[in-house]
Image (cartoon, rainbow, N blue to C red):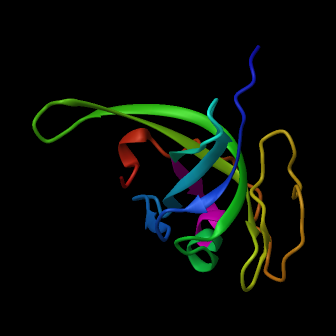
């Protein structure tokens, strides 16, 4: 048994990109920056930014596309996943992603939360926004093959 859970609070590095699988399933992708700040042994402020690749499925993907913009701060929970593919030159490529299962929009105009569903809990995890909550769906639909991913 294991646990695969990522919790991130950070800022979008670009507007979400919404695409649809051949089966019509919405999927949004965006980058999220998390920044760590500390003072080194000499008292000098240091900073390191990590970039995370985020994937969101279903109605939640459409909500992220509608309400999120570059620079917006979000809180999200999801699972870490890796995939590989061969590029057009036959080189093996790898990508680590966070498949977001819930996203909360923090600060800014129209702030609220859009919550994805998780497989263990069919109901919404939170609700504090003025827009409709997404319908229950797994974070990675079973009817979507990795070859169908539009990115």
Q: Residue furthest top?
A: 1
Q: Residue furthest front?
A: 42
In the image, 90 versus 112, the foreground residue is 112
Residue 44, located in which quarter of the rendered image? top right
In the image, 130 versus 59, the foreground residue is 130
In the image, 35 versus 51, the foreground residue is 35
Is residue 112 visible in this depiction of the protein? yes
Which residues lie in the magenta part?
52-62
Q: How many marks?
A: 0
Where residue 75 appears, as percent x and y from the top left, is 73, 57
Is residue 140 visible in this depiction of the protein? no
Q: Looking at the picture, does residue 3 appear above or below residue 126?
A: above
Where residue 115 appears, as percent x and y from the top left, is 78, 61
Q: Residue at x 77, y 78 (%)?
A: 111
- Indicate yes or no whether the magenta region holds residue 56: yes
Q: Is residue 92 left or right of residue 45?
A: left
Q: Residue at x 59, y 79 (%)?
A: 66
Location of the N terminus by quadrant is: top right
Q: Looking at the picture, does residue 118 appear above or below residue 85?
A: below
- Indicate yes or no whether the magenta region holds residue 67: no
């Amino acid at each position: 048994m294991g646990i695969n859970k990522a919790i991130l609070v950070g800022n979008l590095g670009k507007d979400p990109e919404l695409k649809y699988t051949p089966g019509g399933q919405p999927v949004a992708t965006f980058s999220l920056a998390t920044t760590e700040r500390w003072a080194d042994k000499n008292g000098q402020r240091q900073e390191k930014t990590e970039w995370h690749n985020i994937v969101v499925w279903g109605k939640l993907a459409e909500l992220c596309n509608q309400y999120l913009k570059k620079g917006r701060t979000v809180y999200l929970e999801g699972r870490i996943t890796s995939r590989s593919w061969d590029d057009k030159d036959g080189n093996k490529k790898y990508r680590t992603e966070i498949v977001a299962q819930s996203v909360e929009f923090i600060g800014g105009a129209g702030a609220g939360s859009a919550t994805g569903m998780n497989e263990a809990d069919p109901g919404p995890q939170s609700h504090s926004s003025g827009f409709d909550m997404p319908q229950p769906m797994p974070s990675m639909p079973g009817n979507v093959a990795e070859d169908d991913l539009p990115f």
